[in-house]
Image (spheres, rainbow, N blue to C red):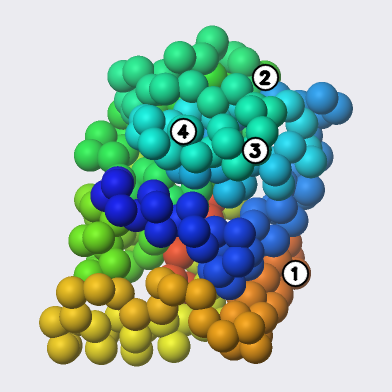
């Protein structure tokens, strides 16, 4: 990922409506997984550590991050409470086989050229009855300056994501779009940026307090929908995976 993007993330991920809303949704999804007591949780691509405290509510947390500056920020932000290791996917993953009850990849897979190989590599880390929770950006036609800034390789459709999941020997327990309520606004903004050739993406800075709160509440409200059914479209995709050979 662009080094400047890590600095922007570190500055905004505790306050920006998108990060806070996503954490609310992911927390609700994890609650529904009914993990074992003292679950072992691994976040692959933890960035500057904005999700680690949320994940720690559900078990003992470890993390993998390839960028040294991001690791340092994450360690400082979380008072060195978590085991954050250097590594990269798919070939440098310094964790033992069958060591994680839950593996999380939150907007990470789209940064990796070898996405199928990465899912194959992290599958071996799953403990018995373990789960993988993944989010990725949706729809290639929404590609914008923001994707370029973040060094994305691609955006996904639900069918494309399902194909790489199956190719990796995994099965989708759930695949759903999300960030659906705000999708029309997001689509207009992304298309406007493309039309006018904007170099920087609209909406990455933290808006005024009222707007930030409104957007956060609107986005996070989708957690109640997602636990009941899949959403048909959205800015992002979410999936829960298990090993195909799981009994």
Q: Earlier in the sequence, mark 3 or mark 4?
A: 4
Instruction: Tell whether 232 sits left or right of 129.
Output: left
Per the model, the C-alpha gap separating discs 1 and 2 is 28 Å
Q: Which mark is residue 128?
A: 2
Which disc number belongs to residue 78? 3
The CA distance from mark 2 to mark 3 is: 29 Å
**Residues tagged 4 and 1 counted as in contact (Cβ below 8 A):** no
User: Is residue 215 something that shows in the picture?
Assistant: no
Question: Is 40 located above or below residue 202 in the figure?
Answer: above
**Disc sitting over residue 75 in the figure:** none
4 or 1: mark nearer the eye: 4
As helix, strand or loop, the secondary structure at mark 4 comes to helix
User: How far is the residue under mark 3 from the one under mark 4?
Assistant: 11 Å
Within-10-Å neighbours for mark 2: few <14, some 14–19, many 20+ = some
State if disc 3 and disc 2 touch (CB < 8 Å): no
Residue 163 coordinates in the image, percent (x, y): 35, 45
The image quadrant that residue 164 belongs to is top left
* Secondary structure beneath label 1: helix
Relative to 176, does residue 142 appear above or below in the rendering?
Answer: below
Q: Secondary structure at mark 3?
A: loop
Q: Is residue 16 visible?
A: yes
Mark 4, residue position = 71
The image position of residue 24, as x and y in percent, is 69, 61
- Give x and y (percent) for residue 207: 52, 82
């Amino acid at each position: 990922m662009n080094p400047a993007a890590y600095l922007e993330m570190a500055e905004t991920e505790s306050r920006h409506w998108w990060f806070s809303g996503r954490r609310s949704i992911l927390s609700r999804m994890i609650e529904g997984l009914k993990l074992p007591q003292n679950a072992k949780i691994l976040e692959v691509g933890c960035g500057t550590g904005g999700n680690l405290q949320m994940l720690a509510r559900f078990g003992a947390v470890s993390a993998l991050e390839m960028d040294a500056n991001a690791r340092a920020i994450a360690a400082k932000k979380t008072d060195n409470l978590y085991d954050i290791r250097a590594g990269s996917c798919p070939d440098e993953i310094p964790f033992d086989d069958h060591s994680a009850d839950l593996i999380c990849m939150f907007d990470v897979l789209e940064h990796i050229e070898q996405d199928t190989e990465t899912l194959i590599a992290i599958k071996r880390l799953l403990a018995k009855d373990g789960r993988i929770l993944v989010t990725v950006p949706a729809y290639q036609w929404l590609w914008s300056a923001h994707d370029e800034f973040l060094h994305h390789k691609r955006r996904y459709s639900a069918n494309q994501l399902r194909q790489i999941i199956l190719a990796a020997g995994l099965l989708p327990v759930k695949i759903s779009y999300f960030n659906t309520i705000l999708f029309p606004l997001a689509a207009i903004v992304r298309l406007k940026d493309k039309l006018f050739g904007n170099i920087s993406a609209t909406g990455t800075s933290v808006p005024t307090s009222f707007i930030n709160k409104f957007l956060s509440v609107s986005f996070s409200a989708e957690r109640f929908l997602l636990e009941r059914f899949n959403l048909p479209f959205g800015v992002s995709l979410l999936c829960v995976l298990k090993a195909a050979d799981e009994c």
